Image (tube, coloured by chain):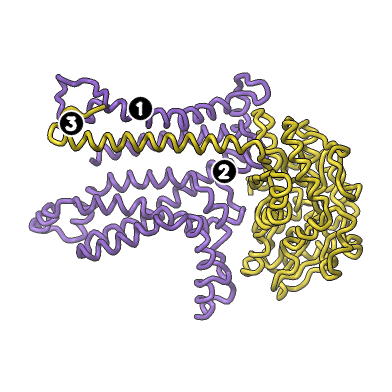
Amino acid sequence: MLGRAAGDISPRRRRVRWDLVLLLAPLALLTGIFFDVPLLNTALWSVSDPATGALTGAHFQEFAQSAAYTRIIWRTLVMALEVTLLTALLGYPLAYWTSRLRPRLQAVVLAFIVMTFWVSILVRTYAWIVILGNGGLVNRTLQALGLTTRPVEFLYNELGILIGMTNVLLPFLVLPLYAAMVRIDRRLLQVAQTLGAGPTRIFWQIFFPLTLPTLAASAIFVFILSLGFYITPAVLGGGRVPLVANMMDLLVNRFARWEMAAVVSVVLMAVTLSLYSVYQWLRERGA
Amino acid sequence: MSVKTDHQSKTKGDVMKKILGNMSLACTIFLAATTGAAWAQQAKELHVMTAGGEYGDSLDKCINEQLLKDAGIKVISETPGGYAKIAAQAKSGVIVNTVTDGSTGDMYRLAAEGLLEPIDWAKLNPEPMFDEAKNPNGFGASYYSTIMAWRSDAKAPQNFVDFFDTEKFPGKRALPDYPEFVLAFAAMGDGMTPEEVSKGVDLDRAFKTLERVKKDTIWWQSGAQPAQLLKDNEAQYAIAWSGRVLGQDGVTATYNQGMLDISWWVVAKGISDEQREMLYAWLRAQTNAEKQKCLVSFLPYPGASPELEKIVTPEMQKTFPTSAENKKVQWLSNGQWWFDNAKEVEKRWNEFKLLQ
């Protein structure tokens, strides 16, 4: 990989670029010591007895037998899927609309989308309470218009988490999709038009298939990210809809059961890595 | 390290390299100097774990600042503390934090697992304090109560049967996300009396109530949340720690049927003699009545000094969970029962919380 970094060297004369190796060594060392080693250590905990340190499969057995762990992992996966679908449904039209605007307007819309990255996730999560709470903007407007008599419960249930997570994750889908859409060769669409295809057919037969690999890759990316959400379910779920990250917090900080937390981490990591490999495969195919 | 292919800007590159080299050298020296200073300072630092928030602020203002002036001990707080962090220290063998605050239940649990260092009361040599606050395994820092509170515009409940009656008293309940602070009240919601729950909680009856009201419940983890949820009209009724809901605008609270408890400082097993000396100085400072008066000006959790109620105003004294009038309508949490039933409580609580 290091050899390939210098693009001008032909395969025949490929040699190790020691200067690059030296330049990259500190980073590799840092990642190894502070990321990989603790990760392996976690994996080790998941199969060792906390008292004796002997290898054991008891924790994984407990994980498989307890209804709670599997149920929460399942709920997290379903939740992540819902978030991904909602993000795709909202994000695709937004990206499409943006890519069709005049260049200057595009820049403005993109700036608005990117701007959400600069606001802390905690602030954005709490902002939803101001907007969707019982005494919030939406409920007061609905009641003032006479549409509802009692406040609608947006928060402290799955709906609240869904709204909060989709809001945070939307840019992760919109930005890559937008980039893919502006790269599409417009002449292909014009050719289809001259051959007599209507706008609907052009979209579904030409445009959409060309954006599909990016859509799939971004959707998987959003799915992976949503597996690890902690703040949003904790705040907007009112403690009623625990997801994996909240369960780990409980195991580590309340019950001091690190070995079970390690098992959950390993399971989650296995799920994430398999999804990531699909993501990479799709991305390489799309590129 | 030089990039050989880059002939044109060689001289320029050399200059850059020299500057970069000098800069990194300067950085290294700076780093070495600051870490060295940090090492030198560490000798007089006392690391503690506290609940933080306003409570942490009150400790900083009333105790820690003076201790730095008088004894040169710098107190460094980590928040929050609790059972899991003490246990993690003991398992890893690295004792960073000397002490944490915890409930009576926490203290029994940690002591039973052999993770606590007993308090050497003779060596600690406190100013006068109530005997019940001088536990062999813990230093009674302050009295607090877990009580019911509601929005002043909501129908007032008379007891916990009313409190958990979501039909006669409609509205959301903000409940503690901690079994030891909610299960006894839930059992009272099913008709157990305070006398009965202070002996032990019928878990079946407690979870029966919680199953009934869980649709109308918001679970809170941080002590400041319940008052905020009531004020925002997100919840109409709450079970909360006394100091956080008393005297808040638009919120009514009562000590009636409240659960009185002591907040303890418990000492991690394995601390060094030097750490213990600093820690005892810190704890001793907290037994001073004037300092306790300063602490209650932040949050109304009175310390264990018998002198305290004589030096605060009668109005303030009335808000204390320990005032004669308030004490008689409350009941005491039974730490031993919680310890004996810890495994069962944890299992049933997990099933209830995670499977809801």
Looking at the rendering, which quadrant does residue B26 occupy? top left
- Residue type at mark 3 is Gly
**Can residue B168 be seen in this snapshot?**
no
Q: State the count of labels.
A: 3
Q: Nearer the viewer, residue B105 or B354?
A: B105
Outermost residue toward the bottom in this view = A145
Q: Please rate how many residues cluster around mark 1, counting C-alpha atoms within 10 Å: few if below 14, some from 14 to 19, many from 20.
A: few
Tell me the yellow chain: B
Identify the subunit bearing mark 2: A
Q: Amino acid at mark 1?
A: Ala
Q: Answer with left or right where residue B253 lies relative to residue A9.
A: right
The residue type indicated by label 2 comes to Ile
Q: Earlier in the sequence, mark 2 or mark 3?
A: 3
Judging by the rendered image, the residue that carries numbered circle 1 is A25
Q: Element at badge 1?
A: helix
Tell me, by letter, which chain the rendering colours purple.
A
Side (left or right) of A5 relative to B73: left
> Residue B220, image x and y in percent?
65, 56
Q: Is residue B268 found left or right of A20 in the rendered image?
A: right
- Taking depth in this image into account, of A188 and B50 the one nearest to the observer is B50
Residue at the spot x=39%, y=58% of the render? A116
Upstream in sequence: badge 3 or badge 1: 3
Badge 2 and badge 3 in a common chain: yes
Q: Looking at the rendering, which quadrant does residue A282 occupy? A: top left
Disc 3 target residue: A7
Q: Position of residue B142 (x, y in %)?
A: 80, 53
Q: Is residue B209 visible?
A: yes
Instruction: Say which residue label 2 marks.
Output: A72
Q: As displayed, is residue A83 above or below residue A56? A: below
**How busy is the neighbourhood of tag 2: few (under 14 within 10 Å), some, or many (20 plus)?**
many
Of the two numbered discs 1 and 2 on the same chain, state the one appearing first in sequence.
1
How many C-alpha atoms fall within 10 Å of the one at disc 3: few (<14), some, or many (≥20)? few
